[in-house]
Amino acid sequence: MVKQHEFQLPAHKRGFHLVTDTVLKHLPALPESGLLHLFIKHTSAALAINENTDPAVLRDFETAFNRMVPEGQQYYTHNDEGPDDMPAHVKSVLAGSSVTIPISGHQLNLGTWQGIYLCEFRDRAGARRLTATIIT
């Protein structure tokens, strides 16, 4: 059986934001077992699974992404929405638009130190739309 739910995450500042609890609040009760697939419906933000304890990890992600994909480069031709426009698109391709998480015992079967992250690559982003697909 497949069920889909669409919802929005509130606007976040640029950076990496733990959203596991927020995602769970938008979902119905999880089945005994299955899969949760989350897809972000934007091209300048991403979803990821990673460290959910040490905030230094999030700062290091921001630093690494900004070094890999710097803003203000002359070679960017798509800059209609400002200097963070094209770099945000490139960063979202690197990070990915979806995550899939096993469901076991009515809970997300994440590792001890894992959480779901919204990777926000825009300086002035709005709410982000997600589609959650639960497969049982």
Image (spheres, rainbow, N blue to C red):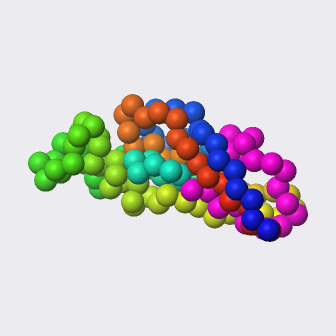
Quadrant the C terminus occupies: bottom right
Q: Residue 110, position in %: x, y?
A: 71, 60
Residue occupying the point 69% across, 50% down: 5
Q: Residue 42, position in %: x, y?
A: 46, 49
The correct choice, above or below, for 42 with respect to 49 in the image is above
The correct choice, above or below, for 88 with respect to 32 in the image is above
Q: Is residue 71 visible?
A: yes
Q: Is residue 27 shown in magenta?
A: yes
Q: Is residue 111 visible?
A: no
Q: Residue 62, position in %: x, y?
A: 40, 45
Residue occupying the point 43% across, 35% down: 125
Quadrant the N terminus occupies: bottom right
Q: Residue 4, position in %: x, y?
A: 70, 56
The correct choice, above or below, for 76 with respect to 2 in the image is above
Residue occupying the point 57% across, 33% down: 10
Numbered marks: total? 0
The front one of 3 and 93 is 3
Magenta segment, which residues? 22-39
Q: Is residue 61 shown in magenta?
A: no
Give left or right: position of 119 versus 123: right
State the residue lying farthest toward the left. Answer: 74
Residue occupying the point 55% across, 44% down: 129
